[in-house]
Structure formats: C-alpha cells, structure tokens
Amino acid sequence: LSFLLTEIVLGEQNIGQEKGEAVTASNLSLKDLLSQLSHFSEKVRRVAAQELRVFLLDFPEQLRLHLALCVERTAERLNDSDREVRERTLEVLSDAILGQLSQEALEPFAALLVAQCGRAATSLTAGARRHALRAIALVAKRAPRLLAGDGAGALSHAQSHAELLDHFRTLLATANRAASVAVSASSSAAAAA
C-alpha cells in the first residue's frame, strides 16, 4: 500500500468579501465590530474601537446605513472602565462620526449622545468624567447645534441639554479647583523649601 501526497493550493478565502459585505483587514464586518465594543475584555474593546474608526473612514456608506447603531454603541463606550477604550471612542466620534456627517444627519441622535455624555459625566470614575468633558467639548466644537437646543427636537431635549451643561459646568469647576489646589500645594512646598 502506498500513498501519493499532493499539495493543494487554495486562494485567499474571505467569507465577508464573498458575500459582498464590507469587512476590515481582519475580516470583521460592522456588526462584528459593534458587538466587540461590548466585549468583556478591554483588549478586545480597544482593538474593536480602533478598527471601527478605520472601518467607518474606509466605508462611509456603512456609517450612513447604520448610523443609529453606530452612534448608540460608540456613545456607550464613553463610560467604559478602560482609559484606552474611552480614548479610542473619542477618536471614533471625532474622526469617523462627527467628522464625516453633517449636523442635520446627527440631529436625530442628539438626545442619545447627550444622554451618554451625561451618564459618563456622572460616573464614579474620574477618568470617565474627564473623557465626558472632552466628548462634550468635541460635540460643541464639531456639531454645536446638537447642544444649542435649536434643532427640530429642541423642546423635548431642552431638559437633557440643561442637565448636560450643568454636568459640564460642574466638571469644569472641579477641574479648576483641582488645578488651583495643585498650584497652591506646589507654591507651599516651594516656600517651605
């Protein structure tokens, strides 16, 4: 009995591309990336946020098709326990979402964005509160009408906008108090030396 061995060469197989679906270099679809943003592992969430940014920049039509889900899942990560995930979430918001869409396209999602920023602003984690402050500033810079309360849903969102601005003022006051305490502590230490 003898066996003949033959090498079989298969071309690259990419299930997502075979279906005509937009995928990342690591063969992940938008649905996969958005589900990985909620993964229990920080490492997986970090990579998912980073790849989501690249994906949305490479496939802007996917952002327009799935805008509600993208804004919802991304905004949820503003209150993540991991600093790097929050950083990368801000990059997704800045570059891929707020950077590519008009304020009019984002207006229906203003309440959701404001609510998630407010949730992060009241977090027990100081880092999440600082990232919330940066997210609010980012929205104010890139899409000020979303916070102005003069859009289509202004009356229904006025309460949440007012609460968010209250959180913003509190965070700024806390940051200023901490900075002045640090300056006075360093001045006292310098005077004592």
Image (cartoon, rainbow, N blue to C red):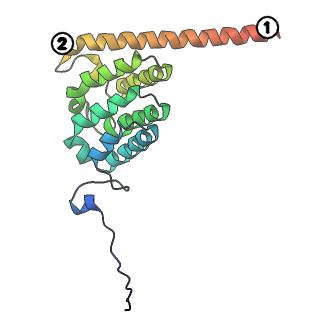
Q: Position of residue 87 (x, y in %)?
A: 46, 33
Please tell me whether residue 147 is drawn above or below residue 189 in the rendered image: below
| Residue occupying the point 38% across, 88% down | 3
Q: From the image, tell me which residue sits under label 2.
A: 155
Identified by mark 2, the residue type is: Leu
Are the residues at dot 1 and dot 2 in contact (C-beta closer than 8 Å)? no
Q: From the image, tell me which residue sits under label 1.
A: 191
Foreground pick, 117 / 43:
43
Secondary element type, mark 1: helix
Task: Give the left or right position of residue 125, taking residue 163 as reference.
Answer: right
Along the polypeptide, which appears first: circle 1 or circle 2?
2
| Residue occupying the point 36% across, 12% down | 165
| Residue occupying the point 30% across, 54% down | 23
Foreground pick, 51 / 80:
80
Identified by mark 1, the residue type is: Ala
Q: Residues within 10 Å of mark 2 (few under 14, many from 20)?
A: few
Foreground pick, 71 / 161:
71
Q: Residue furthest front?
A: 1
Q: Position of residue 171 (x, y in %)?
A: 46, 13
**Numbered-mark total:** 2
Q: Position of residue 25 (x, y in %)?
A: 37, 56
Q: Position of residue 52 (x, y in %)?
A: 35, 44
Q: In the rendering, which numbered label is found on residue 133?
A: none
Q: CA distance from mark 1 to mark 2?
A: 54 Å
Indicate the quadrant containing the N terminus: top left, top right, bottom left or bottom right. bottom left
Please tell me whether residue 79 is drawn above or below residue 192 in the rendered image: below
Please tell me whether residue 161 is drawn above or below residue 99 in the rendered image: above
Indicate the quadrant containing the C terminus: top left, top right, bottom left or bottom right. top right
